[in-house]
Image (cartoon, rainbow, N blue to C red):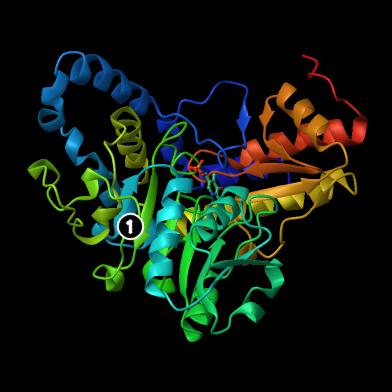
Amino acid sequence: MDRLDCLVADSADPLAPRRAAFSLPDGVRYLDGNSLGALQRRVAERVQQVVELEWGHGLIRSWNDAGWIELPRRIAEQLAPLLGADADEIAVTDSTSANLFKALSAARGLCPDRRVVLTDDANFPTDLYVARGLAELDPRLEVRVVPTAEVADHLDDRVGVLTLTHVDYRTGRLHDAAALTRAAHEVGAVTVWDLSHSTGALDVDLEAWGADLAVGCTYKYLNGGPGSPSYLYVARRWHDQVSTPLRGWFGHARPFAFAVDYEPGPAASRFLDGTPPVLSMAALDTALGVFDGLGTEVLAAKAAALTQTFIDLVDERCGDAAQVVTPRDPQRRGAQVSLRHPQAEALCRALIARGVIGDHRPPDLVRFGFAPLYVRYIDVWDAVTDLAEVLNNGHWGPRTP
Ligand SMILES: *Cc1c(COP(=O)(O)O)cnc(C)c1O
């Protein structure tokens, strides 16, 4: 494979036209969309309009006149096809951490006689912290953290909730969500999936998986902007049975009746709680427009092809200088490739100085994310050229012109 092959692949890429929506700085190969998705021009314009016109001029009238009150529902409608869900199964609100707390608590309520919340030791730290915090409030609950490869072996009739992050944030390893959901159901447990590193880049299909609850963030592959609100999914079959520990007025059946007594809102809407963050919601609402009409399988296919190109080129051009830790089977990885290198942090800094933006995770991993909507094959080629320059030729400083 050479540079021309990458240009040819870009010209044949059905997603290539969508890149034009993004406002990426010149000279940057942005491979960190798994941490913070890129800005789109329309999003910048929308935020400016919301601030200056809707807030500045419309003031309180904009809750209705500008449709602020509709934002969580509008966003849920746009997320639905990316999740394989219906819009009323999705609540858009809060951070992923807060939604996970609510989802775990609700899942726990579905299996009140089971003591164990099962998860794996590769889970994202916030997920482990939140689960243990819930267990502290409920002394009968035990959070069991097991090695990733042994999760299925630990499913038994004491497990009430299986909670996992679909893509390992360090290695990019992908769980078989459908198989693990099935295995959990076989022992009578329910699942809570964290899709933060999946939605917008992979073939997520909660309905096909038979998933129970799920959460995920919107500022990674969904490009909602720093700190944009998260989502919580609850399958329709549980709507009559789930309850949330955070009962805010926005999750009430009639928030503007100002009733003294709580009555949960319909479907997933009960998981809303406080006033929606309108600036972030408006940014996310516009950001999701770029996915309009796209099937998740198209996103997944591009992610698989980009990550494969990166792995092949690293093998070919960097030799043994860095080790690919991400699974080589495209069915077993997310839209991310991680390399192990003893000086991961310095390597990451050297690459950023050359315009290749990835990130590092201690102690020794450098991560590269391949957002299918705006990363090109030529970016992959150029990034590996810089990587090889640093690793093989010891060029740890900025690129010389
Ligand atoms: C990014 C990420 C989060 C983010 O949580 P916030 O509370 O929204 O900051 C949570 N879980 C996983 C697995 C993530 O990758």
Residue 225 position, x and y percent, is 44, 32
Q: Is residue 170 above or below residue 287?
A: below
Instruction: Say whether residue 206 is left or right of residue 333.
Output: left
Instruction: Say whether residue 195 is left or right of residue 284.
Output: right
Q: Could you tell me which residue is drawn at 38 percent across and 49 percent down?
A: 231
Residue 242 position, x and y percent, is 31, 66
Residue 347 position, x and y percent, is 81, 33
The answer as to whether callout 1 falls within 8 Å of ligand 1 is: no
Q: Could you tell me which residue is drawn at 71 percent across and 35 percent down?
A: 383
Instruction: Say whether residue 291 is left or right of residue 139.
Output: left
Task: Answer whether residue 369 is visible to the viewer in this image.
Answer: yes
Q: Could you tell me which residue is drawn at 67 percent across and 35 percent down?
A: 358
Dividing the picture into quarters, in which one does residue 148 lie?
bottom right
Q: Is residue 393 above or below residue 312?
A: above
Instruction: Say whether residue 201 is left or right of residue 93.
Output: right
Q: Which amino acid does label 1 sit on?
A: Thr
Dividing the picture into quarters, in which one does residue 58 lie?
top left
Residue toward you, 44 or 269 = 269
As drawn, which residue projects farthest toward the front? 139
Residue 394 position, x and y percent, is 91, 29
User: In the structure shown, which secondary structural element does the residue marked by tag 1 occupy?
Assistant: loop
Residue toward you, 250 or 93 = 250
Q: For the residue carrying disc 1, how many other residues have a C-alpha within 10 Å: few (<14), some (14-19), or many (20+)?
A: many
Q: Could you tell me which residue is drawn at 44 percent across and 47 percent down?
A: 98
Residue toward you, 372 or 339 = 339
Quadrant in the picture for the C terminus: top right
As drawn, which residue projects farthest toward the left? 257
Residue at image mark 1: 244
